[in-house]
């Protein structure tokens, strides 16, 4: 029995050591979640414009080009579910907030909860952005250990990226994702457009739950005299051409209805805006830094049109 316990201990010790090292890594190395939480907490008294949304606004709206004090709280694969949680956490602590920018993209309204990348990201929102995430049960061990959240190869890749780049933070001090600097040639972006459109198709036309979440945020903003910009971000035309036209029409109608029925809402549809050309895109559905500047200046005009 003693020999068996010895062998078991020898087997277990390396696993425990790796787990501890991974946990220390996740708890000590800043990333977009920890950095954004720190920045919005430290600047809450000055923020006049708050940007929410997924990677489209994360990379596509640069607060540098907005004349009002702006913080970009969007993040990669951030759904309306987490937009609302972040909104509810911070809204009462932003005394100067005048505008909320909400992104509505092809996946936004039909996105189901706890699917795709939410499976692991929810734990980072909980632990590193101090959010109470109802999707996570109290008895789930991953709630207490980030080392258990991701597969080892993903953790190892993050560690190598950190060693190579010296940081896991992919945004500036105002929250803008500042790493999308390049563009594609026309043939490559056409190919990527088809692939990306297929990846984004979830086959759902059920917008009820996420529309209600947006409406709840809009209603709260109206009570606090905050104006809402409902933005459809620019995407490359070939990407739009590969999307379900029926679903696109329903998205248009939903956004229009939200703008018509709420006096504090303005819809800004840039998805088909011809002012955005190939050189403005990093890929089929994300702007690069040049495109982000153009987009941000246009949105700044809308803010001052109120």
Image: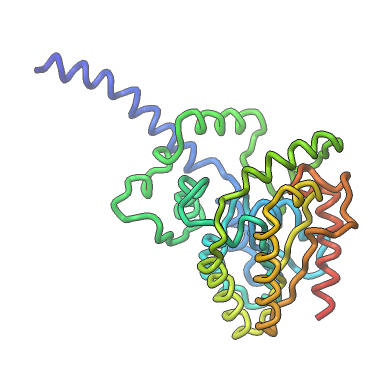
The picture places residue 255, in percent across and down from the top left corner, at 68, 71
Looking at the picture, does residue 107 appear above or below residue 95? above
For the question of whether residue 173 can be seen, the reply is no
Horizontal placement of 290 versus 84: left or right? right
Name the residue at the front extreme: 246
Looking at the picture, does residue 297 appear above or below residue 198? below
Residue occupying image coordinates x 76% and y 60%: 63
Residue occupying image coordinates x 11% and y 17%: 2
Q: Which residue is nearer to you in this view: 124 or 2?
A: 124
Looking at the picture, does residue 17 appear above or below residue 76? above
Horizontal placement of 219 versus 180: left or right? left
Q: Which residue is nearer to you in this view: 222 or 36?
A: 222
Name the residue at the left extreme: 1
The picture places residue 13, in percent across and down from the top left corner, at 30, 24
Residue occupying image coordinates x 59% and y 62%: 109
Q: Give the quadrant of residue 74.
A: bottom right
Q: Give the quadrant of residue 98.
A: bottom right
Q: Which residue is nearer to you in this view: 176 or 28?
A: 176
Looking at the picture, does residue 4 appear above or below residue 35? above
């Amino acid at each position: 029995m003693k020999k068996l316990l010895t062998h078991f201990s020898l087997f277990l010790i390396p696993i425990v050591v790796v787990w501890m090292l991974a946990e220390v890594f996740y708890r000590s190395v800043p990333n977009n979640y920890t950095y954004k939480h720190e920045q919005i907490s430290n600047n809450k008294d000055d923020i006049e414009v708050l940007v929410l949304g997924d990677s489209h606004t994360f990379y596509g709206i640069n607060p540098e080009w907005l004349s009002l004090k702006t913080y970009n709280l969007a993040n990669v694969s951030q759904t309306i579910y987490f937009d609302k949680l972040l909104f509810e956490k911070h809204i009462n602590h932003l005394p100067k907030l005048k505008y909320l920018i909400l992104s509505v993209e092809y996946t936004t309204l039909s996105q189901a909860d706890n699917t795709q990348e939410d499976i692991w990201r929810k734990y980072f929102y909980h632990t590193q952005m101090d959010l109470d995430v109802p999707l996570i049960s109290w008895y789930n061990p991953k709630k207490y250990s980030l080392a258990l959240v991701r597969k080892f190869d993903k953790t190892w890749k993050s560690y190598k990226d950190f060693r190579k780049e010296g940081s896991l933070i992919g945004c500036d001090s105002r929250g803008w994702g500042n790493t999308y600097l390049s563009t594609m040639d026309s043939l490559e972006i056409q190919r990527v457009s088809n692939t990306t459109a297929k990846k984004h198709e979830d086959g759902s036309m059920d917008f009820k739950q996420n529309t209600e979440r947006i409406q709840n945020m809009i209603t709260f903003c109206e009570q606090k005299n905050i104006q809402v910009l409902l933005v459809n971000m620019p995407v490359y035309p070939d990407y739009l051409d590969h999307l379900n036209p029926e679903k696109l029409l329903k998205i248009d109608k939903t956004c229009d209805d939200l703008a018509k029925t709420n006096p504090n809402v303005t819809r800004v549809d840039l998805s088909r805006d011809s002012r955005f050309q190939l050189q403005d895109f990093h890929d089929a559905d994300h702007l690069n830094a040049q495109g982000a500047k153009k987009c941000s200046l246009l949105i700044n005009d809308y803010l001052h049109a109120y």
